[in-house]
Image: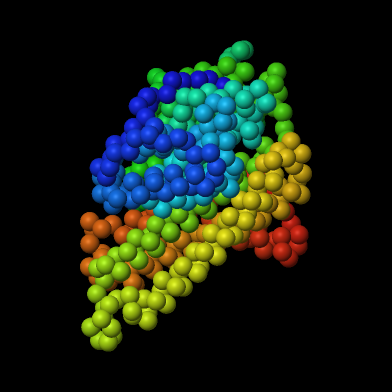
């Protein structure tokens, strides 16, 4: 797979909130240390998240923060300077970052998926090369792989593949160092993934992402014109033939769990931000007989109920992540039964996370009061972020997967969405 130079060279991040010199402390060596670093990143992001949401500017500084904190190399080999961590740790890191800013949590989650994608579909040689290069250079990954757009075609020109077409979504776009492309070879039904430099004449990002939520994900459309890729860089192909395994189909469960965790992270950010506002600024109801809002019975019920629901959803998500790691640890021997049963559990976690996150992000206003609807506070951003991304694929189909397995033993068949 092709390489590119890393654009970020300084080991220092500057935001409106503070300056952090990450080189002053050694890189974490265990999961607990990486989670603590993710919390540091969260605290930086959350301080001006509302104003950055209003501005909607390209998140160059935020991605620099992810790079310089080392979070982009969390899954990378330690020999090349990576964190050497597992997916259960990565999902919790995504959750922490999303609690500070949902858009940046999504960007990190997608990046880690595409970083890992070489393991899902690549040959052993490709896996080693991509992970080493990506870790050493701290590449940030974007992806032009919207499966509902079947309009990127590939010409086979001997030793090279040539990509042409358009995708309506390309998360990461201008902030990425490399982009994962997907297309179909002309006259066949053969899909080919490849990693290419983002900054090249053949890739045009259109800056047309203007949605109500996840505004900083750089998810606009992209035109691909004559992008050339050596056949040797076609993921999982040997002598122009794909090397299939059941593990190839784990890309959807992995990304769906990424969704689960940044939904829950956004919900956690909403609940924590709301609780702080209620503690410090919400006034008690004048007819309630309480001196403080935090003593109001309805406030205690509200925050107690939402916390219980969020803890339960987080526990399910963590357990499913642990189950997934067992599959990743034996990637070359995954069976269809293992894959199918795991996807059912992922579907259940996705359904629950969607419901809980939507409920919490819309319901926190009951504990805030009318003054909290001021646009400068942007409490609505949490709901807008969850609402925008949870429409990625209908949650009813996730519940259907679970119900079909319970009633008939039917296992989900691998598709672009299951």
Residue depicted at 34% across the width and 60% down the height: 273
Q: Position of residue 214 (x, y in %)?
A: 38, 48
Question: Vertical placement of 199 versus 387: above or below?
Answer: above
Q: Is residue 137 visible?
A: yes
Q: Is residue 246 visible?
A: no
Q: Nearer the viewer, residue 3 or 407?
A: 3
Residue depicted at 26% across the width and 67% down the height: 280
Question: Vertical placement of 303 versus 106: above or below?
Answer: below
Q: Nearer the viewer, residue 334 or 238?
A: 334
Residue depicted at 28% across the width and 49% down the height: 48
Residue depicted at 45% across the width and 32% down the height: 140
Image colouring? rainbow
Q: Position of residue 201 (x, y in %)?
A: 39, 19
- Which residue sits furthest top? 158
- Name the quadrant containing residue 318: bottom right
Q: Quadrant of the N terminus?
A: top right
Label count reads 0
Question: Vertical placement of 233 versus 341: above or below?
Answer: above
Q: Position of residue 352 (x, y in %)?
A: 55, 62
- Which residue sits furthest front? 25
Q: Is residue 181 left or right of residue 288?
A: right
Q: Position of residue 339 (x, y in %)?
A: 71, 47
Q: Is residue 230 left or right of residue 176?
A: right
Q: Is residue 127 left or right of residue 57?
A: right
């Amino acid at each position: 797979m092709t390489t590119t130079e890393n654009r970020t060279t300084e080991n220092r991040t500057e935001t409106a909130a503070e300056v952090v010199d990450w080189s002053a402390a050694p890189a974490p060596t265990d999961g607990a240390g990486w989670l603590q670093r993710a919390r540091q990143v969260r605290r930086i992001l959350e301080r001006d998240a509302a104003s950055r949401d209003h501005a909607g500017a390209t998140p160059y500084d935020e991605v620099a923060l992810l790079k310089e904190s080392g979070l982009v190399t969390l899954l990378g080999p330690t020999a090349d300077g990576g964190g050497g961590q597992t997916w259960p740790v990565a999902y919790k890191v995504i959750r922490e970052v999303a609690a500070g800013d949902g858009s940046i949590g999504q960007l990190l989650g997608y990046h880690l998926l595409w970083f890992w994608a070489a393991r899902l579909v690549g040959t052993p040689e490709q896996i080693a090369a991509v992970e080493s290069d990506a870790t050493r250079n701290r590449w940030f990954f974007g992806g032009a792989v919207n499966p509902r757009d079947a309009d990127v075609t590939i010409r086979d020109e001997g030793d090279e593949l040539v990509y042409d077409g358009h995708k309506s979504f390309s998360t990461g776009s201008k902030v990425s160092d490399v982009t994962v492309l997907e297309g179909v070879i002309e006259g066949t039904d053969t899909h080919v993934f490849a990693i290419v430099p983002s900054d090249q004449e053949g890739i045009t990002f259109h800056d047309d992402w203007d949605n109500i939520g996840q505004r900083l994900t750089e998810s606009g459309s992209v035109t691909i014109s004559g992008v050339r890729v050596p056949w040797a860089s076609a993921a999982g192909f040997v002598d122009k033939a794909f090397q299939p395994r059941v593990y190839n189909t784990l890309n959807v469960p992995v990304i769906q769990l990424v969704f689960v965790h940044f939904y829950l992270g956004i919900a956690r950010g909403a609940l924590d931000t709301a609780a702080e506002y209620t503690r410090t600024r919400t006034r008690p109801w004048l007819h309630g007989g309480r001196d403080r809002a935090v003593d109001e019975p309805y406030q205690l019920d509200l925050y107690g109920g939402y916390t219980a629901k969020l803890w339960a959803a987080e526990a399910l998500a963590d357990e499913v992540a642990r189950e997934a790691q067992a599959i990743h640890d034996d990637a070359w021997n995954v069976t269809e039964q293992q894959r199918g049963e795991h996807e059912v559990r992922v579907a259940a976690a996705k359904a629950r996370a969607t419901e809980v996150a939507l409920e919490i992000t819309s319901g926190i206003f009951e504990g805030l009061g009318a003054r909290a609807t001021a646009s400068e506070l942007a409490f609505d951003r949490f709901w807008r972020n969850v609402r925008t991304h949870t429409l990625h694929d209908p949650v009813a189909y996730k519940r259907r997967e679970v119900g079909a397995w319970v009633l008939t033993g039917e296992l989900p068949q691998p598709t672009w969405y299951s």
